[in-house]
Image (cartoon, rainbow, N blue to C red):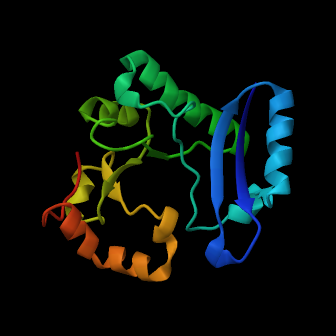
Amino acid sequence: MGVIFMLHRIGPPQYASGLNAFLSCAPDFLDELFGALKREGWRFVTLDEVADPLCTIGAHTSHHFSLRRLERSRAMEEIAGSVRRIGAEIGQTPRHFAYPYGGPSAVGEREVDLVREAGLATAVTTRHGLLQPGHADHLHALPRISLNGEYQQPHYVETMLSGLTVALANRGRRLVTL
């Protein structure tokens, strides 16, 4: 049995945490897990709560494997299976994709081709970067700014969005792709 869920830690918005996952396990384990999470202040988020023109639910694979380590057919099934499952759950097919792990060891030309073949409009890697006009030619290998861990504070986000950290991380390169 598999369950897709999105949880949100209850608390002030500036300290909000999210957990998105796909679990494939026994139902009794899920009951135990969800009970423990609820005791720690987590609750389910409804689709109505994330319904916003600026919010899109995308695909991410079924089991969070590094696609580059899988045989081609298995990697494609991870991508397509995730798209199908999320589409069935939310009533619309996802158009966007986030590569698991997303770095050079996890995403190459083959994975970009697979995502394109799966019919997805865009895909993001974990390569640190801001979108540039040249990315129009690389829609399935887009960079992103990851807001995780300690980097959720407003001053960190402002610095990252200024481009300063991108220039440092990429030795001055502005167009970051594969």
Q: Quadrant of residue 165 in the image?
A: bottom left
Q: Which residue is drawn at the image coordinates 56% and 57% (left, top)?
A: 56
Using the image, determine if residue 44 lies above or below residue 1: below
Q: Quadrant of residue 1 in the image?
A: top right
Which one is nearer the viewer's eye here, 28 or 83?
Answer: 28
Using the image, determine if residue 26 lies above or below residue 8: above
Exactly how many numbered labels are in the figure?
A: 0
Which one is nearer the viewer's eye here, 91 or 113?
Answer: 113
Q: Quadrant of residue 24 in the image?
A: top right
Using the image, determine if residue 25 lies above or below residue 166: above
> Residue 178, how many percent across, how many down?
22, 45
Which one is nearer the viewer's eye here, 172 or 150?
Answer: 150
Using the image, determine if residue 173 lies above or below residue 119: below
> Residue 48, how many percent across, how many down?
76, 61
> Residue 154, how many percent across, how many down?
48, 81
Q: Which residue is drawn at the image coordinates 28% and 29% (left, top)?
A: 110
In-image side of 129 versus 168 (left or right):
right
